[in-house]
Image (tube, rainbow, N blue to C red):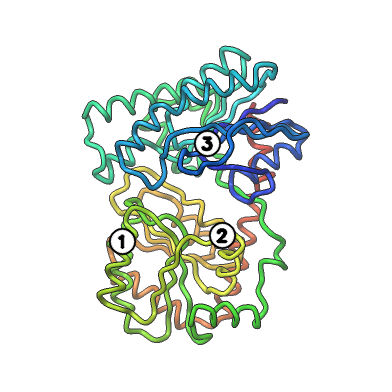
């Protein structure tokens, strides 16, 4: 088959690692040609155009700025995006007939492109549902329910669901939510979780010397239990709650917290660190993938944070990196997501509600009292769970079996 994958992720090569790159590589390994449509923001000043390969190629489309920019500029850029995608596909893929188009949320504004490919090529359409918008924005108070903007995006959302022949959801809770709230045909919805092609287990383990070197680089004692969070620092993560948790542990000398990421609410953490100057908290910028992997190898527990106000069942992809490198996970989330149930029932971590920082501290106290061998065994359990449920090759076969 010729497969078209449309995304807002900046993909430059299938050799990159990530949930979408790994999945597309798995589809190529199944014998299909994959053509990717990916953006180039104006500020990046990188070349746009089609870069072919033996297995398909990547079409880079010049768009306005959508990352780390103001709401107005981002809004305008998002509104213009789908027309730019359609024009680029028409121009560069005039002679390519697509059998299948795969696309992910966010955004929900790829409707025109999907409709164009369905109409032109009679292609099968497959939605990877990674984000339920606009309800997530309503949950966080970023969008008023019933406003004209909410109605506009809700109409787009419903249209996207209706033109999708199949919808792959991240977890059973996502499937249930969609069936209950979005009036989506049950037959088109199924579980197709976030997935990766993990590094070999032997490569995921760090020797004591490498661990010592990484910890020395950041000034962290080998006696500390190191908790790490890697990812976005925005409204969905409820950074104010993260700070509450850090404050309750900032005078404890048996633990260390590394927060690695960036986002709209990062400045809240910067202000906290400047005012309180805790000795056991380190804030790092987003690291290149290889450096981040080395950091994970030197840590003991991975952290997940989600705002307690969410009514939609998010399932953060950062969980997979922790599992890949054998870290047990402490998830602090709302009660609607099933990520906590997966972690606890899978035997590789703990869950607490993200409105109870004192309970978070009690759980952290229990973790710090555990022997390292217990944490290693839990981390290994997580890795085994990953290999059973979240491999890119398994997700690719699920998609192909459906279509």
**Mark 3 secondary-structure assignment:** strand
Mark yes or no: residue 25 visible: yes
Q: Which residue is mark 2?
A: 288
Q: Is residue 201 above or below residue 176?
A: below
The C terminus - image quarter? top right
Residue at image point 60% right, 26% down: 101
Q: Position of residue 49 (x, y in %)?
A: 61, 31
Q: Position of residue 41 (x, y in %)?
A: 48, 39
Q: Which residue is mark 3?
A: 39
* Mark 2: few/some/many CA within 10 Å (<14, 14-19, 20+): few
Mark yes or no: residue 389 visible: no
Q: Which residue is mark 1?
A: 267
Whole-Å distance between the Cαs marked 1 and 2? 21 Å
Q: Is residue 275 above or below residue 231?
A: below
Does residue 141 appear left or right of residue 41 in this picture? left
Q: How many marks?
A: 3
**Mark 1 secondary-structure assignment:** helix
The N terminus - image quarter? top right
Does residue 77 appear left or right of residue 50 in this picture? left
């Amino acid at each position: 088959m010729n497969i078209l994958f449309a995304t807002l992720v900046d993909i430059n090569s299938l050799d990159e690692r990530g949930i979408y790159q790994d999945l597309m590589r798995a589809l190529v390994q199944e014998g299909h040609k994959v053509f990717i449509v990916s953006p180039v923001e104006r500020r990046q000043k990188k070349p746009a155009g089609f870069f072919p390969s033996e297995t398909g190629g990547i079409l880079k489309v010049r768009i306005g700025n959508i990352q780390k920019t103001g709401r107005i500029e981002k809004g305008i850029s998002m509104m213009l995006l789908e027309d730019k995608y359609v024009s680029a596909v028409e121009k560069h893929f005039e002679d390519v007939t697509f059998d299948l188009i795969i696309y992910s949320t966010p955004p929900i504004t790829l409707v025109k492109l999907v409709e164009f490919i369905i109409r032109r090529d009679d292609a099968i359409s497959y939605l990877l549902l990674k984000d339920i918008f606009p309800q997530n924005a309503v949950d966080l108070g970023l969008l008023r329910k019933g406003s004209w903007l909410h109605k506009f995006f809700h109409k787009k959302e419903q249209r996207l669901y209706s033109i999708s022949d199949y919808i792959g959801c991240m977890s059973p809770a996502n499937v249930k939510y969609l069936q209950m709230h979005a009036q989506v045909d049950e037959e088109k919805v199924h579980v197709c979780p976030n997935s990766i092609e993990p590094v070999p287990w032997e490569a995921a383990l760090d020797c004591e010397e490498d661990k010592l070197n990484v910890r020395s680089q950041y000034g962290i004692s080998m006696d500390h239990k190191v908790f790490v969070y890697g990812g976005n620092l925005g409204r969905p993560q409820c950074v104010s709650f993260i700070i509450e948790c850090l404050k309750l542990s900032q005078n404890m000398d048996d633990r260390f917290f590394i927060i690695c990421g960036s986002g709209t609410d990062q400045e809240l953490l910067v202000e906290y660190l400047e005012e309180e100057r805790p000795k056991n908290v380190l804030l790092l910028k987003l690291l290149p993938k290889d450096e981040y992997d080395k950091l994970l190898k030197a840590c003991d527990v991975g952290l997940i944070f989600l705002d307690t106000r969410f009514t939609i069942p998010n399932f953060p992809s950062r969980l997979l990196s922790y599992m890949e490198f054998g870290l047990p996970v402490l998830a602090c989330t709302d009660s609607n997501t099933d990520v906590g149930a997966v972690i606890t029932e899978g035997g590789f971590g703990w869950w607490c509600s993200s409105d109870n920082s004192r309970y978070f501290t009690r759980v952290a106290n229990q973790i710090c009292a555990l022997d390292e061998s217990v944490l290693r065994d839990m981390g290994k359990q997580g890795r085994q769970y990953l290999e059973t449920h979240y491999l890119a090759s398994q997700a690719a076969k699920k998609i192909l079996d459906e279509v």
